[in-house]
Image: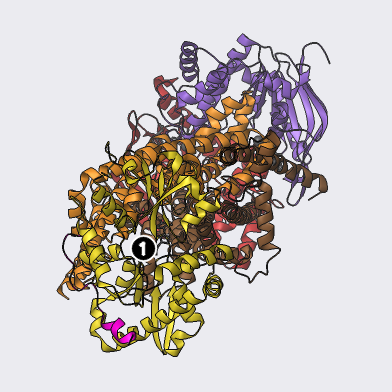
Chain colours: A brown, B red, C purple, D yellow, E orange
Amino acid sequence: MSSAGFISRFAPVLTIIAIIIAVWYASAVALNAPWAQDKAKRAGVTLSFSELVSDTWAQEKPKLPAPHQVATEIYNTTVMKKITSKRSLIWHGWITLSATLLGFALGTGLGILLAVGIVHSRAMDLSVMPWVIASQTIPILAVAPMIIVVLNAVGISGLLPKAMISMYLSFFPVVVGMVKGLRSPSAMQLDQMRTWSTPKSTVFWKLRLPSAMPYLFTSLKIGMAASLVGAIVGELPTGAVAGLGARLLAGSYYGQTIQIWSALISAAILAAVLVALIGLIQRITLQRMGMLR
Amino acid sequence: MSEATVIEAKNLSLTFQTNDGPVHALQDINLEINKGDFVSFIGPSGCGKTTFLRVMADLETPTAGEITVNGMTAREARKNRAYGYVFQAAGLYPWRTIGGNIKLPLEIMGYSKAEQDERVARVLELVELSGFDRKFPWQLSGGMQQRASIARALAFDADILLMDEPFGALDEIVRDHLNEQLLALWARTEKTIGFVTHSIPEAVYLSTKIVVMSPRPGRIADVIESTLPRERPLDIRDTPEFLEIAHRVRDGLRLGHGDDV
Amino acid sequence: MSEATVIEAKNLSLTFQTNDGPVHALQDINLEINKGDFVSFIGPSGCGKTTFLRVMADLETPTAGEITVNGMTAREARKNRAYGYVFQAAGLYPWRTIGGNIKLPLEIMGYSKAEQDERVARVLELVELSGFDRKFPWQLSGGMQQRASIARALAFDADILLMDEPFGALDEIVRDHLNEQLLALWARTEKTIGFVTHSIPEAVYLSTKIVVMSPRPGRIADVIESTLPRERPLDIRDTPEFLEIAHRVRDGLRLGHGDDV
Amino acid sequence: ADDVTLQLKWVTQAQFAGYYVALDKGFYGEEDLNVTIKPGGPDIAPAQVIAGGGADVVLDWMPSALASREKGLDLVNIAQPFKSSGMMLTCRKDAGVASPDDFADKTLGVWFFGNEYPFLSWMSKLGLKTDGSAGGVTVLKQGFNVDPLLQGQAACVSTMTYNEYWQVIDAGLTPDDLQVFKYEDQGVATLEDGMYVLGENLKDEAFKDKMVRFVRASMKGWKYAEANPDEAAMIVLDNDASGAQTEKHQKRMMGEVAKLTAGSNGALDVDAYQRTVDSLLSGGSDPVITKEPVGAWTHEISDIALK
Amino acid sequence: MIWIAFGIVFWAAMWWLNLRLSKAKPNKFTGFVVPTIFGVTILVLWECLVHGFEISPVLLPAPSAIATRFANSLPILWVDFVQTFVKGALSGYILGCGAAFLTAIAVDRSPFLQAGLLPIGNFVAALPIVGMAPILVMWFGFDWQSKAAVVVVMVFFPMLVNTVEGLKASDHMQRDLMKTYGAGYFQALTKLRLPAAMPFIFNGLKICSTLALIGAIVAEFFGSPIKGMGFRISTEVGRLALDMVWAEITVAAIVGSAFYGIIALIEKAVTFWHPSQRR
Ligand SMILES: Nc1ncnc2c1ncn2[C@@H]1O[C@H](COP(=O)(O)OP(=O)(O)OP(=O)(O)O)[C@@H](O)[C@H]1O
Ligand SMILES: Nc1ncnc2c1ncn2[C@@H]1O[C@H](COP(=O)(O)OP(=O)(O)OP(=O)(O)O)[C@@H](O)[C@H]1O
Ligand SMILES: Cc1ncc(C[n+]2csc(CCO)c2C)c(N)n1
Ligand SMILES: [Mg+2]
Ligand SMILES: [Mg+2]
């Protein structure tokens, strides 16, 4: 990419980020001000505007921490800590990431398999699809502990239970997207295949799958985000020992908003990177398929 | 049904149910096509030519009557890969290059890699698209896409070739050339060919049998057995015999059009 | 550039960059089209006819040279809704009925409801599709779709009508009918028409100017000004004058095809 | 060594210091036990874990354990290191709460997930309805933290002496701003953090023996923690995989927890038990438990262990 | 043992029946009966296994127990449904999908926003609800407003991604046609790009319909009034009243499926022209 292309590509992102940060700082003032005033009132002093602002940006447990507070926290818990340390966000991030990736792989696999089944077998379509939908309406946080207890009882613990919850959340977008995608070839394209008396499997590989690509990648992006959420949710009932979810919970439990936000932002960065990665693969694939013009 | 009968339609009817009432696309069609016949279907737009071709290829199920192909049902014939089909619209897969599109049926039918390449090269040559095999469909002009789709149907050895207005988007010269090529191929391979066209001269030049259809409901108005010899140089088109057949076809068409125009 | 010049191309070139090298679709095209001209483009498949039409309608940007329409850029002309365009493939929107598809440009251009209905009925009649306005595109035959797409372009009053092989999928009789209708419309409205066809008689019958193109790179091989009167009954096609022009076109085409065939 | 799995009621913190100390100091090892401590969380019901076979011993509050018994899960208290209750309701004075008489028509934050029973029985004792009707109290399901109090969404929130209370203080409110109601002081205290096992397991002598050793080592841990609170807090900190705990907070928590465990040798105080049961039974129209529990505790283990 | 054996035999029989039914000509009847048989089979199998293996009701109650509890708790279930679904999920769903839709249009409209907002959209998407929920409860209070806010955050991304992708879905010729009409941006949008985007948009709406319910329920774990499906579930798990938990889950499943089904019906009506609807 040329440097000009680079600039033109990133200038918008940077601008938007700048706007968001400005809004963020302003909101920090607005949201944290009541507490600052409250404190001041109880202390019997009145705050000037600049005192107020600097107070709202430097509280220990602010309602909304200022960006630099979060940045400092992230810096302190990533760069400044050994990555093997329990206080290192990288260590926690890795724990969550591994469950996310495993869950994503399982979820995508399951999702695609189900979609293939649903598209090819009427029995599957009629009987499984409604239950796949129903499965998603079961609040995962409610059943997660039961799943964990049951898995524990059969001796499965560690990464896998979390990955299962990840999988549970991520397979659904993949099923929905892929069913639609695998059904998107036009009537003529399918007829064409029929005239060659093409076996179903070949129709799948040579027609349905390529036509489903735009749907697949959209689903994968959502699935990836869902799977990260799943990994984090899964960390709560597994004892919330480690991982970004545990950090979030602990932060929440002790009212440490700065810690919550830093875990939150790290999780979001992680997800954004993963989603961007899928976007990249999408570009490359579609390019090679001649579908990008 | 004689021994050589390849396709036989008996009292065939097909009605489409649409949001505003049924459409009788085919009604009471009776037709016999023999092995090695070159049958052209001609008739006004919307008279059911495409529908009939689709029924023959088991892409559409008739609502009444029956059709047999090689003594089997159309479905069995399709399973035996008896058909090469050129659709009215090119219908190339956008994610495959032209070469890849032509290879597609070959891959499906399990030709060897070498054979595939050899055949792709040969049919591309035939339709004058050599050198375009690595282009994507949207990089080709309309006529070129149409030719690629013809090439795709010719690349493998189907007994029955069904072509739905294959040459509609081509200029006269290319069209003449492909007409000749098609006749040569037909003579060489003894394929049975079903061919939809709007050009009377083309129908007469190519066919051993010309089926004139009339619309709403789609019926067969006339079946004309050609008296032309199988060997047909291009200038046969100036013979009185040729003109006479053409005349008969035109009359049939006029009749079919009826009060419509 | 005379006062009546509507479209003027100067040293127009267009090169597509593809995965395996550049394709010179148009090279050094110079052409003037006057108000009220009926210009046919004819030439072998892939010679750049569609591309040229697309350049005129500002759907493609030339890589060299320039084009002016009514003294403006093609872009401005497009924004002024100067064009009616019939694509080579029908391109109807599947979520709209035939009637809805024809209404589409009318809605965009802000015709009143009553006017819309009136126009839809009129053009459907013109292309012989009355009664089909509530059908969806996939419920129509290929030729019917093509006619619907023509109707769509005729429904509103564009100064310039660009038609890319509009009658390719139609039978002779409908085609003749539509040829007549088109001429009548042209005479009535003084539209400027750019028309791609592969049929020499059609080109000669319709046009005031016939542009013969040759391929790779796409160039203008010949521009033939028709000497036929503007008033043209169908049987003008048997006059010697007509045949002579047709002959000249055919020669141009042969030349253009060159070593290709 | 014999394997024992202990399921905590909440995340790793000084509330469970005794067990971590016993583990860290090798007290379990000395008893030839191989102990695994599973931290809990907002989503983990210890009773369910033990029912599913995920643990040998669980820590639970007695109201919740007794309620589970009524659901058919045979939980038996084998030891009770926590002598007194650390539960309280912390109110803002500026919300106008000076005594329990002021609760009416106020919004109170309460923990659920099996932790709500002491509150409910207190309210029924006060004759306050909790269903939101006029003259009663409005109940909020309180999240993990004390935000509702800080933000004035609730007049009072539930706090533990050793934990949430200090979060309120840390957040900048002073003890002067607050009015606290300890359950102990209100006479509605119930027993917290006891060790429970499944009754059927107690029929197994080998299991009983394991538990004897477990209780013995755990109590040794507790007494060590009481004596060395700072060291105990650091041990807890070392065992916290989330890396979220702070030294200051854990040391303070240890100090408070020591006050609650002080005076317990681990044996269940039968009077305290009876008080808890009575309080739960007396819940007016909607008591937590409906009949006097039978066999909900045993001294069999603690008697041997503490010999 | 008898329970288990019966369960397995029943399951095999129903499986066979379903295979038979789905091979038959598709009609309304099979479309309804096949999934029902499937569901009934699962329930019967579940009942048999619970009795057969004597699974403790504090781990997994039998369907019959759940049904009894369900029937006896209708008023509570209704109150919870209104609190969680109608107030929390539905309002959040509408707001969130609406916002995502508008954002997608903005993103589509302006290349600048496209480059700037989309990566950030990805970013926001991944803000895990578990982390967002406490914050949003802090900001929006305990009642349904914070649940709706959680739902907004949760559904935003799937809807955004799908809409953005959908807006790219019209083909070149269709767009060229619009150009020749000199159609303005909004005309091209309403007449071409939105209709063409509908299959994608409905994908998003369908996925979000289930997410919304999950989001609203999960958000209640982080603070709530003492009603609502999430509140009830977490409270009753703590009380080991698993039959009540499953009764709520049943409500969630019914409501969620119905919600999804309604959207699928609308989809069918709106995208009747798409190949996936014209099998
Ligand atoms: N899927 C369909 N649903 C409803 N009606 C249909 C369908 N396909 C075709 N028809 C109708 O059937 C009739 C015959 O169509 P068919 O495509 O066979 O015509 P055709 O002879 O091939 O015409 P053309 O020369 O224009 O291609 C037409 O009136 C058409 O509207
Ligand atoms: N988008 C594109 N990318 C690359 N090459 C293209 C593209 N569109 C057209 N071409 C090439 O440009 C040349 C001219 O194409 P064009 O469509 O103008 O031909 P045409 O005269 O309309 O032919 P036909 O009569 O077959 O429709 C062809 O060689 C074609 O391969
Ligand atoms: C959802 C939720 N439930 C309970 C507590 C409070 N809490 C923390 S430790 C403890 C005692 C357990 O032994 C209790 C009751 C909370 N903060 N959040
Ligand atoms: Mg047809
Ligand atoms: Mg063209």
**Apparent side of residue D200 relative to residue D9 in the rendered image (left or right):** left
Residue at 23% in and 72% down? D296
Residue at 70% in and 52% down? B130
Residue in front for this viewpoint, B222 or B239: B222
Residue in front for this viewpoint, E88 or B100: E88
Confirm whether residue B190 shows in the render: no
Q: Is residue B54 above or below residue C249?
A: below
Residue in front for this viewpoint, D288 or A164: D288
Range covered by the magenta-colored residues: D289-307
Q: Pointer 1 indicates a residue of which chain?
A: D
**Apparent side of residue D36 relative to residue B151 in the rendered image (left or right):** left
**Apparent side of residue D25 relative to residue B148 in the rendered image (left or right):** left
Residue at 72% in and 26% down? C56
Q: Position of residue A38 (x, y in %)?
A: 56, 39
Q: Position of residue E234 (x, y in %)?
A: 35, 55
**Apparent side of residue C168 relative to residue E205 in the rendered image (left or right):** right
Q: Quadrant of the N terminus of chain E?
A: bottom left
Residue in front for this viewpoint, C71 or D101: D101
Q: Is residue B19 above or below residue A140?
A: above
Give, as a three-letter code, the residue at label 1.
Ser
Q: Is residue A256 above or below residue D227?
A: above
Examine the image and state in which quarter residue A293 appears. top right
Q: Position of residue E15 (x, y in %)?
A: 25, 63
Ligand 5, image quadrant it occupies:
top right
- What secondary structure is the stretch in magenta mostly built from? loop
Numbered disc 1: secondary structure = loop
Q: Is residue E29 magenta?
A: no
Examine the image and state in which quarter residue E74 appears. top left
Q: Which residue is mark 1?
A: D85
Examine the image and state in which quarter residue B50 appears. top left
